[in-house]
Image (cartoon, rainbow, N blue to C red):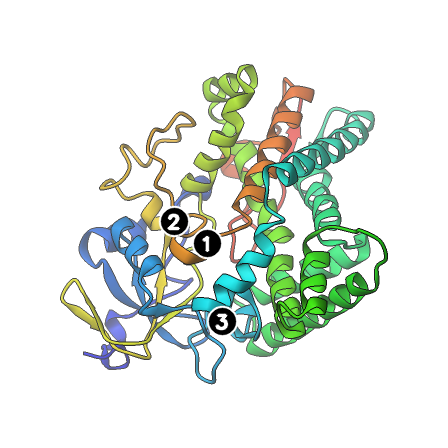
Amino acid sequence: MKIVDWPAADVLKIPGDFPPGPLFTVPPILAELRDNRPLCPVEMPSGNRLWLVTRHADVRFVMNDPRFSRDLVFPGAPRMAGDDLTSVAGSLFNMEGDDHTRLRGVLSSCFTRRSADVWRATTQRHAHDLLDHIERAGQGADLVEDFSEPLVARVAGDVMGLSRAEHATTQEHIRRQLDLLGSQEQITSATTALTELAGRLVDRAAESKGGASGLVTTLARAAREGTITREEAIGTTGLLLMNVTDPLVPPLTVGVMTLLRHPRQLGECVRGPELWPEAVREVLRYHNNGITNFPRVAVEDVERHGIVVSAGEGIVTSALAAAHDPREFVDPHVFDVRRREKGSVFFGAGPHFCLGSVLATVVLAAAYEVLFKRLGRLRLAVEPHEVRKADGGFFACPESLPVTW
C-alpha cells in the first residue's frame, strides 16, 4: 500500500502526537512505535505523509543506503513544515555522489585537530568573560539568557564571521524556519532571508584581503578558484549558519540541567576533565533534540519489515528513538557519561555524517568544563518540573533556566 492510501486514523501527526516525556526526555510514543510499528506513516506539519523509522538498525540502514536520497531540490519534495533550507540548491545537505564528495572535501580542511584546539580556546575565553559578568551581577542568573545564548552567539560569530546583530537576526530566522508550528509563508520567508545573508557573507569573505581563514572564507576561496560554484558556496554557508547558531543552545542548557540532576557523574567529570566529551555525547544521545531528522526521498522501491517504500515517497529517521533502542544500548533510559556503547546516530551516519560534530562536541565540552569549574556550587533555583519548554521549536529547550550558587 502506498503511503497516500493509508487510512487517516492510522497516520500519526508530528508534532501533536509526539509530546516529550518529563524533563525534556524522549516522547513515550517513540518506544511504542519502535517495538510495534518500526516503519509507520506520519503526517508532517507541511501536510506531507512520510515513513517514520525508529529502530537503531533501521535508522543506520536508511542513512547508509544510497536508495534514500537527501537531494530535495525539486517541486513536491518531502518537507517537514515548509520550504526550509533543504529546498535550497547548492547546499552540501542536498548533494549526493561525486558532487557531495567534492564539496565535502573543500570543507574538511576546516575540521582538523588544530581547528578544534582553536574552537576550544575561543569557547573557554568567551565562557570566562560571560561568567565574570554573571558573578558580578549577584547570586543568581538565567542560564539561557545570561550564558547559553550569548556564548553560542559569540562562538558562532567567530566561526562564521557574524556580527552580534547578524547573529541575532540569523537566530531568529532559524527559529522561524524550524518552527514546526509556523506557517508556510513564515518558513519560506525565513529561508529566503537566511540565503540572502549567506550570500552577503560569501561576498564579504571573497573581498577580504590577506590569508584569512574560516569556514565561509574557505568556501568563498574555493568558489573563486572554480572548485565549487558560487551557488554551492552560498547554499552551504546557509547550512552552516543553521548548524552553528541556535541548535547548540538546547544541548548546552539541557545538558547543564541534566548534569545537575546527576551530581555523582558531574563530580566525576569535574575531577576528570577528559570525561567532558563523553558527557556531551551522552547528553546528545539521551535528550529530545528533535523528534525526527530531516527527510530523505526513496529513488527506487525499498522493502523493510514487509512494507515497500515506493520510489518518490519520503522517509524520516528518528535519531532520538534510535538512541533509546534497547537492542543497541543497555538501559537506554539511564543517563551514563561512562556509557560503553558508542553507536549514537545523533550526528548521522554514512556519507552525510555531520562534519560539524567535532565543532559541536568541542564547544559544548569546553562550556560545561568552564561553567562547573567556575561555579562549583551551581544548582537549579527552581524545581526541575517547574522548568518550562520553549514553544514551537524543532529542538527541545527550556524557556529559561534559573540557577544559583
Which amino acid lies under the numbered mark 3 shown in the image of this protein? Ala
Residue 245 visible, this orientation: yes
Between discs 2 and 3, the one toward the N terminus: 3
Measured along the vertical axis of the image, is residue 379 above or below residue 103? above
Q: Nearer the viewer, residue 330 or 377?
A: 330
Between discs 2 and 1, the one toward the N terminus: 1
Point out residue 222 in the picture as x, y percentages from the top left corner.
67, 63
Which amino acid lies under the numbered mark 2 shown in the image of this protein? Leu
Please report the residue visible at 50 percent of the width from the left and 35 percent of the height from the top. Answer: 280
Which residue is situated farthest in the bottom direction here? 75
Crowding at dot 2, Cα within 10 Å, few <14 / some 14-19 / many 20+, comes out as many
The image's mark for residue 324 is none
Between discs 3 and 1, the one toward the N terminus: 3
Q: Are marks 2 and 1 in contact (CB under 8 Å)?
A: yes
Q: Which residue is mark 3?
A: 81
Which residue is situated farthest in the right direction here? 209
Please report the residue visible at 71 percent of the width from the left and 53 percent of the height from the top. Answer: 160
Q: Are marks 3 and 1 in contact (CB under 8 Å)?
A: no
Point out residue 296 in the picture as x, y percentages from the top left corner.
39, 68
Measured along the vertical axis of the image, is residue 277 above or below residue 72? above
Q: Nearer the viewer, residue 313 or 223?
A: 223
Q: Which residue is mark 1?
A: 290
Callout 3: SS:
loop
Looking at the rendered image, the quarter that the N terminus falls into is bottom left
Callout 1: SS:
loop
Looking at the rendered image, the quarter that the C terminus falls into is top right
Callout 2: SS:
helix
Point out residue 67 in the picture as x, y percentages from the top left corner.
31, 69
Q: Is residue 298 left or right of residue 372?
A: left
